[in-house]
Every structure is written in structure tokens, then in C-alpha cells.
Amino acid sequence: MDVERLLSWYRANKRAMPWRDNPDPYAVWVSEIMLQQTRIETVYGYFARFMARFPTFRALAAAPMQDVLKAWEGLGYYTRARNLKRAAESIRSLPGTLEGWRALPGVGPYTAAAIASVCLGVAAPVVDGNVSRVLARLRRFAGDTRSAPARERLAAWLQPFIDCAEQPGEFNQAMMELGETVCLPRSPACSRCPFAGTCLAHAAGEEEKFPERKAKKTIPERHSLAFRHSDGEGRFLFAQRPPDGLLGGLWELPNQEAKRKTTTKAARPVFHSRTGLVPSAVRYAGTVTHVFSHFKLQFHVYDVEASGEPKNGCVFALPETLPLATATRKALRL
């Protein structure tokens, strides 16, 4: 690997990002957590709003969890936000070592390496999905690069090259930028790649065969009966999810898991049992679909007119005041 060729390419082609060039460790931390499993184009707006609302880790630590989740609303993978908040609460100062970063909740090996290399100059290679794709093609690496052992082997191979770099953070960002903008999963732009002359997969015309992937499993489908009930003043009935687990701490329309969409008559007792309210009219409003990483949710929405006092943790609130699950935001737009 020609490190100088890589860095020259990077300096000429790198994109402007608000956490680059004058990296504040807190800003880099927030950006790296947001970038886990999320495209850069999606992160820009969220990052700017989040940093304006929580400009320091102490501000984040002092903020209510509900405010943090609201700022994260729509970005998905909410465990990231909860871990970020809990990590901020657990420290008195930002870590000054790679090991210190790795000890924080939600900071795995590649996130810690990214932060420590950019902010502390630590020669720790980042091997995320983009970098592993570059290396898999460069070396025609056999095996599923998503596994931890495979990424450890790739990091070990990369270590001597980052050791030679004067700025380890720049080296890591160059590798990630190459994977994000040139060495794409489909139709890689090999003519613009600084490694085109030494890439084994490119030489064999097998770029899209690497990295090797196991066949995707068909994800199961789940159904839920969801109830949309308003007090007539713009407030809707919501229920909060448990603090941990899937969508932990977010609010959603009261709902009940079911085998399938049902009749309005059959939905009445479900609504009453879930909310404590007595329905006088129920109408099917439509179905929204939301895909999680491990299942597809069919959210069957029913408009309900009802009377009584809500129970079982259900409350009336304006949608804009609560951090809402995406399926609920979709349901409110029906």
C-alpha cells in the first residue's frame, strides 16, 4: 500500500465536514456515534442540531434523556443515543487514551480508534465497513469481513502502514473516505482510486465479488394493532416504551402485537384493554410499514373515538413535544 499516494488523493478530494480539520474530541465522538450504520448525508443535519442543543459533554450529561432522544428522533438505532448520554454522565473529563475511549458505553474498537487517532494522534487503524471493503478488494481477502476475527486480521495487516503515517487520524479518514466515495459496494469508481494499479480484485475484474457476503436471511414480519385517538385539541394518546431495549424510552401510539390486521369490531376490546378508554367508534385508517434490522413491522392503524380516563401509562401530548418512534410518526401522517 502506497501511503503517500493515498494521502495525496485524500488531501485533493476530501469532503468538508463540521468535525474535520479542527477536531474537538466531543464533536468527533458525537459524529462517530451518529455515523455508526448511518450515511454521512443523513448525519449532517442531526449533528448540527445536536451540537447546538448539547454543545459540551457536560451539557449532554445534564440534559434529560427525553431531550436527548428527541434530538435523535428519526436517526434510528436509539441505543446509540442512550449510550452516548450515559457515557457523558459517567466521566469527569474526556478520555486521553485509546483504552479510555474503549471503556465508554457504545464505543467499540473502530469508534475508539477513529476518535483516538484523529484527536490524540494514536496509531490505531480504523476497520469499519468502508475500510474493510477497500482492504478486501485490495488483497482479495477471503471471508466475511463483518466478523470480529476478520476485522482484527485486517487491522493487524493495516497496522504497519498507519505506523508510517505522520498523522494517523488523517490516514484513517483517508481510508474511510476512499470507501465512502470511490470503493463503493456496487459499481466502484476504480478509475479514480489511488490503489487501482495494485488492487488484486481490480486486476482480476472481480471488484464486486469482494468482500464476500453470506446470503441474507429473509427477515420475519410482525403485525401490531395501533390506535390513533385525539382529544380534539391537537393532542394524541401515546404510551412510552420501556427505558431499555428496542426503541427504549421513545413514545408511540398505544398498540398491541397481533397475528394480522383485524376487524374494527375485534379491535375495540384491544383498544380498551390497552388504554382503559371506552371506544364509541373505531375506523381502520391504514397500514404503515417500518423495517428494522431484524424484522419488518406492519403497523395497522385504527382511528378511535372514546371516553374516559387513560390508564396503563397512556397520556395525551402534542406530538412535537415527545421523542416518537418512526412507525408512530408515519401513522400520524396517514
Image (cartoon, grey):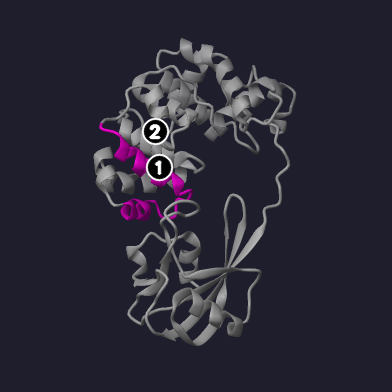
> What secondary structure is marked by label 1?
helix
Residue 182: x and y, percent? 57, 32
**Where 147 sits versus 242, above or below?**
above
Residue holding disc 2: 104
How many neighbours does mark 1 have within 10 angstroms: few (below 14), some (14-19), or many (20 or more)? some
Q: Quadrant of the N terminus?
A: top right
Q: Which mark is residue 7?
A: none
> What secondary structure is marked by label 2?
loop
- Residue shown at 40% from the left, 71% from the top: 314
The question of residue 50 being in magenta is answered with no
Task: Give amino acid for label 2.
Answer: Leu
- Residue shown at 47% from the left, 32% from the top: 108
Residue in the foreground of this view, choosing between 12 and 53 = 53
- Residue shown at 42% from the left, 61% from the top: 324
Q: Which residues are magenta?
A: 65-92
Task: Give amino acid for label 1.
Answer: Asn
Give the image quarter of residue 51. top left
- Secondary structure of the magenta portion, mostly? helix
Give the image quarter of residue 322. bottom left
Which numbered disc flags the more N-terminal residue, 1 or 2?
1
Residue holding disc 1: 83
Q: Marks 1 and 2: CB-CB under 8 Å? A: yes
